[in-house]
Amino acid sequence: MTMNPSDPANFSRRAFLKGASVAAVGSRVGTEFSKGAELDKSSSILDKGSHPITLQVNGSKRELKIETRSTLLDALRDSLDLTGSKKVCDRGACGACTVLLDGEPVNSCMTLAFDAVDAEITTIEGLARGDELHPMQQAFVEEDALQCGFCTPGMVMSAVACSKRHGGSPSMDQIKNDMSGNICRCGTYPRVFKAIQAAGKEGGR
Amino acid sequence: MHSFELFLPDNIKDASLRGGPNAVFKAAGTDLLDRLKERIENPETLINLLEFKKDLAGINPQAGGFDIGSLTSIHDIASSASLAGPEWRALKQAAETTATPQIRNRGTLGGNLLQKTRCWYLRSEAFKCLHGGRGPSCLAVDGENRYHSVMGTLDCMRVHPSNLAPALYVLGAELSTQSGEESNRFPIAELYPELPLASEAEHTLSDNEILTHIHIPAAVTGTSTAYVESREKLSFDWATTAAAVLLVMKGKAILSGRICLGAVAPNPIPCDQAAEMLAGQDASMELFGKVAAAAYAKAVPLAQNEYKIELGKAVLRDALAQASGLR
Ligand SMILES: Cc1cc2nc3c(=O)[nH]c(=O)nc-3n(C[C@H](O)[C@H](O)[C@H](O)COP(=O)(O)OP(=O)(O)OC[C@H]3O[C@@H](n4cnc5c(N)ncnc54)[C@H](O)[C@@H]3O)c2cc1C
Ligand code: SF4
Ligand code: FES
Ligand code: FES
């Protein structure tokens, strides 16, 4: 099967992976399935090697070659040189790796890169417009909402999603709830909360 | 994490047939990746159930209750308008208090019910314990056991970590599974081993059986439910004890009740005898105190977790008070 990856109609995981280095499983039938079960030919398998995929990151299509086991965080940092998302716990427990998948915050360390093929990925690098900071980034600067800054990229991504979800004016309870997956060992929470309130409507842009 | 091949099934039957001892099903992977990264499991193949997101995610009203797809995210349950009524409240409260916004956005209901215990010995490559299949004994019995079981003296002191399972117990949920072309439907209690010994897997699904739906039956008039848990932090923490309750009320009178405890034993623990004490009584904190004492009557603490028993009783009292409207 051939496809044009720049045509959004073709941009489904299934179509794309099949266009890439995927073996049809038909050939495995009989050796793997003792009960003589038949698999439909349209299921597919990606072997342990590397495979080309395309991710939609910050509005552009990025091609890369990754192993099946690569997390989205590793793909962003190691293959695409987008090192803004941080690896701290690598277990879904701190939020430093938070990115937006179709607008919703997720832990990129607990997401396989292959599972992000169909999604729009927004990382911290995707927020600013050229040299102009995103309003949430600007609010973090103005409210002095960071110390060492290591948690900050993840904080900002959750903050943007929080602001957007609540129409730019989240209550303190909503902020605390939405930010509860981001841990800051420098204890910047009160200023982060203030920054989210200060960013106002533009914070969820 | 070791390398694995990734199987992208076209249909549920294919996914099931690919199951086996060296393969593991993956939903969002928020629990599974943790186990793979720790190298406590090293499967050859991951079978990606997310291919079925379109078919198996969603909360659909059905005969007065709901059919919920196993791939429905915890966030979608927590924010569901259909589940807003008091009769379903326990499920929503259990979902709202699970993990973090990021995990709730991706983690699925099926994965929550089938996740492995968080016992820190089991979860670490460095420790070799009986239930992990790598050592001769339970390391928690005489080790660091403040979060472990208080409900008995089996050979594994793990606790079941799921918030949603106790809520689904009191709601009388049933599960549908598919293996090959065969489908099965059974009460949620049968998802967990009758005697949860170290040698037992934590759930009873076979290695080619896929959980497809969770069915919640219609609620009787007067039904009210609640889920309450204790934890060390205000937000984003595992439960130290948990209680889900269902009451059928007529005014102040309780016609019948159901109770299920979480985070205190290797399985969710239904407390039928304690719940029977509720039937025919008027709601009162005194009654709820007696019921809570009965629910924990057989509790046996380990060296570091005696606190769980008093705390667990208080949490159950709170849940009963919420469901009855006393609080
Ligand atoms: C930081 C953190 C905090 C957490 N806190 C809590 C908490 O407070 N309370 C709580 O209850 N949970 C908590 N969790 C657990 C979380 O709810 C689960 O990780 C999540 O629900 C698992 O869903 P998943 O889709 O990612 O499952 P996966 O990780 O993909 O799968 C989990 C297991 O279920 C099996 N599986 C999944 N779906 C199916 C299916 N349909 N059929 C057959 N097998 C299947 C997989 O083989 C695997 O063994 C927490 C997790 C993290 C990482
Ligand atoms: S409680 Fe169970 S899982 Fe934990 S160390 Fe003991 S045997 Fe292992
Ligand atoms: S690095 Fe992903 S949550 Fe900590
Ligand atoms: S600013 Fe240092 S960890 Fe948050």
Image: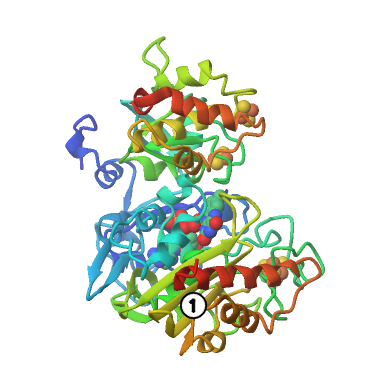
Q: Chain of mark 1?
A: B
**Residue B254 to residue A108: above or below:** below
- At x 46%, y 82%, the residue is B257
- At x 36%, y 30%, the residue is A168
- At x 28%, y 70%, the residue is B66
Inspect this view and state whether residue B257 appears.
yes
- Which residue is more in the foreground, B257 or B160? B257
- Which residue is more in the foreground, A5 or B163? B163
- Which residue is more in the foreground, B100 or B228? B228
> Residue A148, position in %: x, y?
64, 23
Inspect this view and state whether residue B207 appears.
no
**Residue B211 to residue B282: above or below:** above
Crowd rating for badge 1 (residues with CA inside 10 Å; few <14, some 14–19, many 20+): some
Ligand 4 quadrant?
top right
The quarter holding residue B60 reads bottom left
The quarter holding residue B17 reads bottom left
User: What residue is disc 1 on?
Assistant: B204
- At x 46%, y 28%, the residue is A196
Please give the count of numbered marks on the rendered protein: 1
**Residue B24 to residue A98: above or below:** below
Confirm if mark 1 falls within 8 A of ligand 1: no
Left or right for A196, reference B266: left
> Residue A194, position in %: x, y?
51, 27
> Residue A51, position in %: x, y?
39, 39
> Residue B206, position in %: x, y?
45, 75
Q: Secondary structure at mark 1?
A: loop
- Which residue is more in the foreground, A18 or B322? B322
**Which amino acid, by three-letter code, is at mark 1?**
Thr
